[in-house]
Each structure stands twice: as structure tokens, then as C-alpha cells.
Image (cartoon, rainbow, N blue to C red):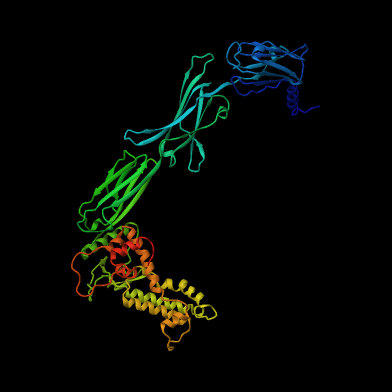
């Protein structure tokens, strides 16, 4: 005896063994072949009439089947059926929507001619016609201000059935295509043919902010509105006639130097290129004050602003900002207004202190020092204060590893470099003076570990005859100790060079580095260029003038004039 829990399951199994199973159907293209299936499970009819195929829209019997064979009533449409062990299969050689048999309807199989036992073989046979002459395009849309606002991607077809549907995908930076989720717009027009078709159009608006930089590219699908219709057509690739990019900003001012005198009136020029057209603004970073702005209506926007006569409080960072719907780009220019007296310098220091305190920083009065650069024997006394404390005045200090002196000379720096090089030579003495190692290898070690210490910052040295003698003496000091030549041994420098299998190279290396750096300076119109080649106003001092860096390079390059030396350094040759 079966339990009550198993009884529903047994009833379900018994029912499934005698009840027919519903068949499925797929969309079919007009004029093509399709097959419908009716599964009965087993032949249970009491008579020879086994099954009828019915066209539901007109309740028309299309084919009648006995237990052995089927007979066609509409052979001119190419419809036939066969009987198998589980039911019947109906084949339509040429699907059509025209004439008496409109096949775009529900198909039924009726076992044993009993309408009470009808089986739906197909809920509705989806008949479609692929789009003819599909075309897709993209166009730009401008807002009222004339700025590039969005792209409209659209597709159309001259003939399709049923009404067309569309799917648009855009290319991302990673060359992947993602579906556009914006709302699509459709327009359908029915043709006058029999059977009727449609002329369909679809479009979507894509905001510029959602597009990646470069030329926008899309995949567009226009397909008949049937199940999985998108799989029935190929994609159309669409490229917009526009290059989308964030603003590219250039920012210049009418001086090769970032230093100005009080009363100067610099002019700033800010240019931005972008699509959509960018808007430009010029602001001060410290005060956040907007100085000028311009709204772009072309791919290129330009802003020009001339400052009022400067004073020391105008020392600031000036920011040019280019912005469109695709991004923001900024460029900065720092300008300093040179102080003519201690009062202006004190004002500048007060500005630095105030701005630092806004960021939670405080100037360290013990570590903040002042240096006055002057050619006078007695240096002027500075009176610069922070919070009532007078800053200490120094004769020299280190900046980025180089020693800066108040007299503007580099004698102290060269002496410091020589001392550091000799100290490090002594630390490596066991290697550099080891006769078991060839002199060539030891010289390579000297070039690798000691000479960089000696020549650090040499690009800015002014090498006088006295300085050159000190450097050459240092070079010989290295070689004599590497060869273990006693200071009491009476050997000339030429003999030492011969034993070391080398020549004097140190000064030549320094000059080459200076020429290379000088070439970089000449090729960039920056402050360094102005300092190196500019002329000072006023009278020259009495007595012999100090040697300039460019004069030393002129002699070394064997150029007749300083101008020839400048041109020689620009070709990156590094020396004669």
C-alpha cells in the first residue's frame, strides 16, 4: 500500500505517460524552410485517424495523418508531414505570410481528431524578413552656446519585418564594447505592399561625458523584433566624425624669466585645444582670485590677460584651467617679484609665513637664515625678522649639496669637493692602491666611485686658472697614490701619467659636462638661459672682471666669440 506522500508523485508519473508534450518553434525567415514537431508519447487512437495539423488563425486543417501516413491538402505551399513512433513532424518548405495560408499564427496538432486533446505545436510562428540596405551613422549635437554636447548614433533600413529593434554598443579605452543604456528613439513606417513590411529608424543620444578620448567608435545592430533577433544580423561599425579629447593647455607669459621687477606688467597667454571646445579661466592660486575667463566656441580657445603694475605682493602661482565636458587640465606659472629693498623682502617673507600657517605649517626661526650676495669686502647687514626674531645672516650655506658663498664665487665649493673626494679615496685605499689589480681596473674604479663625488655640480663652476691648477693637482694626487709613489720621489707628472697609461682627463671631463648642460640651457628659454646670456644694466666695476662660464667654454671649444660657443653647444656634440 502506497503512502499518502508518494501518491501525488505516482499520479504525476501516470499522467505524463499518457498526456502529450508541447513542442517548441523558432523564428524563421520568410521564404525559408522550417519544421514543427508534435509529440504524443504513443499512438492511443481507437480509429485509424491518428492526427490532424490545424492552422489556428482560420481553424484550417492543413494535413491529416493516419497511423501510417499523412495526406497534404496544400501541396502547392510545399507543406508535408510524416508519422513517427511518438507523433508527427510537419515540414514547411517555404514559409510565407501571403495568400490563404498566413503561416504567422498558432499551429495545433489534434490527436485522433479530438478537439479536446489539442496540442500547441507552436504558440506563434515568428516569420521575419532581414533588414534591407541597413545604414548607420553618427552626428554631433551642439548646445545653445555652440559647444559639443552629445553624439547621436542612428540606424535605418528600407525594408524589414516585423518592426525593427536596435542595439548600440560603444568602444571603451580597453577596446571592449559595452551596451549603451540610454533611451532609444524609434520611428516605423508601414509599406503599401502585400504582405506589408516596415521602414524603420532608430537612434540614441550619447552624452560627451560618457565617451572615451579619441575618435568615438560604435557597434550598431538593427534587427527584426523576434526572439533572439539580434543574433540574426551582423554588426555595423560606426565612427563619429569627431575626435573627443580633454583640453590640451599651453600657458606662457611675455618673459623668458619667472622673475619680475616691481612695476612690470606681464602678459599671460593661455591656449586650450579640445573637443568639445574648452572654457578657460585664469586664477591666482594663493588668493583664488579669478583674473579672466573666456568661453570656447571653437576647438581652440585663447585667453590673454595683462597684469596691472606688479608689487611684491603679486608673487604667486598663476593657474590656467581648461575645462570641457570630458575633463579638466591645468597649467601653472610661478612668478616672483624681486624686492628692491629689505622692506619688500620682509613683506614677501610675511606672505610665506601666513600661507604656511593656513596649511598648519610654521617657519622654524632657528633654521631659517639669510645670506646677502655682494662683491663688497664688508657685507651689508640684513634686518629680516620672523615674529620679532631677527634671522641669522650667513656667509655660505649648502643648497642641494652645493656650497653657495656670499661673494658669488665657487672657490669654497671646489675646495669642499676636493676634500670629500680625497676622504672617500682613503676609504677605498685598499682597493685603489692594490698592485695585484691592474692600473686600468683601478682607474675604472676611480672614475666610478671617486670622480662623481669630485665633479658633483661642476656644470655651474667657473674655472679660473687657479681653480684649474687645484683640480689638476688633485688628479695627479690620485694617480701618485694609486701607483704608490712617495712624495719624496722625484718623478715628474709626465712620468706618472706614462706609468698610469693615461693622460690628463679631469678638466676635459668637466668641460664636456659643462658644454652638455650649457646646450640644454640654451635650448630652453628659461631663467637659466637669461642668467647665462643676459646683460646687466649699469656700469661695470673697476679692475679686472671676473671670468664667466661662457668665456671658459669659448676657450675650450676654440670658438672665436661667445656666440659661436652658444651655437656649438646647441648641436649636443659635447665638445671639440
Q: Quadrant of the N terminus?
A: top right
Residue that extends furthest to the left in the rendered view of this protein: 539
Task: Give me the residue at 54% from left, 30% from top.
Answer: 234
Tally of marks: 0
**Above-or-below relation of 392 to 126:** below
- Where is residue 194? Give x, y as percent: 53, 13
Q: Is residue 135 above or below residue 562?
A: above
Residue 91 vs residue 187, the one in the foreground:
91
Q: Quadrant of the C terminus?
A: bottom left
Residue 496: image location, x then y, percent: 44, 82
Left-right relation of 81 to 359: right
Question: Which x, y percent locates residue 532?
Answer: 29, 64
Query: Would residue 510 be visible to someone looking at this image?
Result: yes
- Name which residue lies at 57% across and 21% down: 128
Give the side of residue 481 with respect to residue 73, left or right.
left
Does residue 232 appear to the left or right of 403 in the view shown? right
Q: In the visual, does 18 lie left or right of 277?
A: right
Name of the residue lying farthest toward the right = 1
Q: Is residue 400 visible?
A: no
Q: Position of residue 437 (x, y in %)?
A: 54, 78
Q: Is residue 491 above or below residue 193?
A: below
Asked if residue 172 is positioned above or below residue 25 in the image, the reply reads below
User: Between 502 and 319, which is closer to the camera in this rendering?
Assistant: 502
User: In terms of depth relative to the viewer, which is nearer, 365 or 494?
Assistant: 494
Amino acid at each position: 500500500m502506497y503512502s499518502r506522500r508518494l501518491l501525488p508523485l505516482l499520479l504525476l508519473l501516470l499522467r505524463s505517460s499518457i498526456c502529450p508534450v508541447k513542442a517548441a518553434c523558432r523564428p524563421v525567415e520568410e521564404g525559408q524552410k522550417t519544421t514543427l514537431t508534435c509529440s504524443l508519447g504513443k499512438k492511443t487512437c481507437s480509429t485509424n485517424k491518428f492526427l490532424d495539423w490545424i492552422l489556428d488563425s482560420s481553424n484550417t486543417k492543413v494535413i491529416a495523418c493516419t497511423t501510417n501516413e499523412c495526406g497534404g491538402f496544400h501541396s502547392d505551399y510545399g507543406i508535408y508531414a510524416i508519422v513517427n513512433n511518438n507523433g508527427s513532424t510537419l515540414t514547411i518548405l517555404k514559409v510565407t505570410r501571403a495568400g490563404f495560408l498566413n503561416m504567422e499564427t498558432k499551429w495545433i496538432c489534434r490527436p485522433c481528431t479530438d478537439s479536446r486533446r489539442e496540442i500547441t505545436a507552436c504558440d506563434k510562428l515568428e516569420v521575419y524578413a532581414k533588414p534591407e540596405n541597413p545604414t548607420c551613422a553618427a552626428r554631433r549635437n551642439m548646445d545653445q552656446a555652440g559647444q559639443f554636447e552629445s553624439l547621436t548614433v542612428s540606424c535605418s533600413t528600407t525594408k524589414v519585418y516585423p518592426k525593427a529593434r536596435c542595439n548600440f554598443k560603444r568602444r571603451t579605452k580597453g577596446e571592449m564594447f559595452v551596451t549603451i543604456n540610454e533611451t532609444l528613439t524609434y520611428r516605423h513606417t508601414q509599406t503599401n505592399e502585400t504582405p506589408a513590411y516596415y521602414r524603420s529608424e532608430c537612434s540614441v543620444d550619447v552624452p560627451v561625458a560618457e565617451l572615451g578620448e579619441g575618435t568615438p567608435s560604435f557597434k550598431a545592430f538593427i534587427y527584426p523584433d523576434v526572439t533572439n533577433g539580434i543574433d540574426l544580423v551582423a554588426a555595423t561599425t560606426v565612427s563619429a566624425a569627431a575626435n573627443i579629447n580633454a583640453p590640451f593647455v599651453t600657458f606662457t607669459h611675455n618673459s623668458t624669466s619667472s622673475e619680475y621687477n616691481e612695476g612690470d606688467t606681464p602678459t599671460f597667454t593661455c591656449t586650450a585645444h579640445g573637443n568639445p571646445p574648452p572654457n578657460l579661466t585664469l586664477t591666482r592660486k594663493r588668493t583664488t582670485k579669478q583674473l579672466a575667463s573666456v568661453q570656447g566656441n571653437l576647438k581652440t580657445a585663447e585667453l590673454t590677460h595683462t597684469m596691472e603694475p606688479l608689487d611684491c605682493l603679486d608673487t604667486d602661482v598663476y593657474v590656467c584651467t581648461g575645462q570641457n565636458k570630458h575633463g579638466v587640465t591645468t597649467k601653472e606659472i610661478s612668478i616672483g617679484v624681486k624686492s628692491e629693498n629689505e622692506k619688500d623682502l620682509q613683506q614677501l617673507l610675511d606672505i610665506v609665513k601666513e600661507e604656511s600657517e593656513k596649511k598648519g605649517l610654521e617657519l622654524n626661526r632657528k633654521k631659517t637664515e639669510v645670506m646677502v650676495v655682494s662683491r663688497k669686502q664688508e657685507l651689508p647687514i640684513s634686518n629680516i625678522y620672523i615674529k620679532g626674531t631677527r634671522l641669522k645672516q650667513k656667509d655660505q650655506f649648502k643648497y642641494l649639496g652645493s656650497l653657495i658663498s656670499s661673494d658669488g664665487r665657487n672657490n669654497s665649493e671646489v675646495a669642499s669637493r676636493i676634500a670629500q673626494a680625497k676622504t672617500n679615496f682613503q676609504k677605498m685605499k685598499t682597493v685603489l692602491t692594490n698592485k695585484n689589480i691592474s692600473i686600468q681596473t683601478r682607474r675604472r674604479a676611480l672614475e666610478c666611485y671617486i670622480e662623481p663625488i669630485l665633479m658633483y655640480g661642476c656644470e655651474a663652476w667657473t674655472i679660473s686658472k687657479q681653480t684649474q691648477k687645484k683640480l689638476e693637482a688633485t688628479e695627479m694626487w690620485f694617480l701618485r697614490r694609486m701607483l704608490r709613489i712617495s712624495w719624496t720621489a722625484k718623478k715628474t707628472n709626465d712620468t706618472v701619467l706614462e706609468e698610469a697609461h693615461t693622460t690628463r682627463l679631469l678638466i676635459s671631463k668637466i668641460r664636456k659636462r659643462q658644454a652638455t648642460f650649457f646646450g640644454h640651457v640654451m635650448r630652453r628659454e628659461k631663467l637659466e638661459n637669461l642668467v647665462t646670456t643676459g646683460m646687466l644694466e649699469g656700469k661695470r666695476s673697476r679692475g679686472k672682471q671676473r671670468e664667466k662660464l661662457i668665456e671658459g667654454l669659448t676657450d675650450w671649444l676654440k670658438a672665436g666669440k661667445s656666440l659661436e660657443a652658444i651655437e656649438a653647444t646647441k648641436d649636443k656634440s659635447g665638445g671639440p
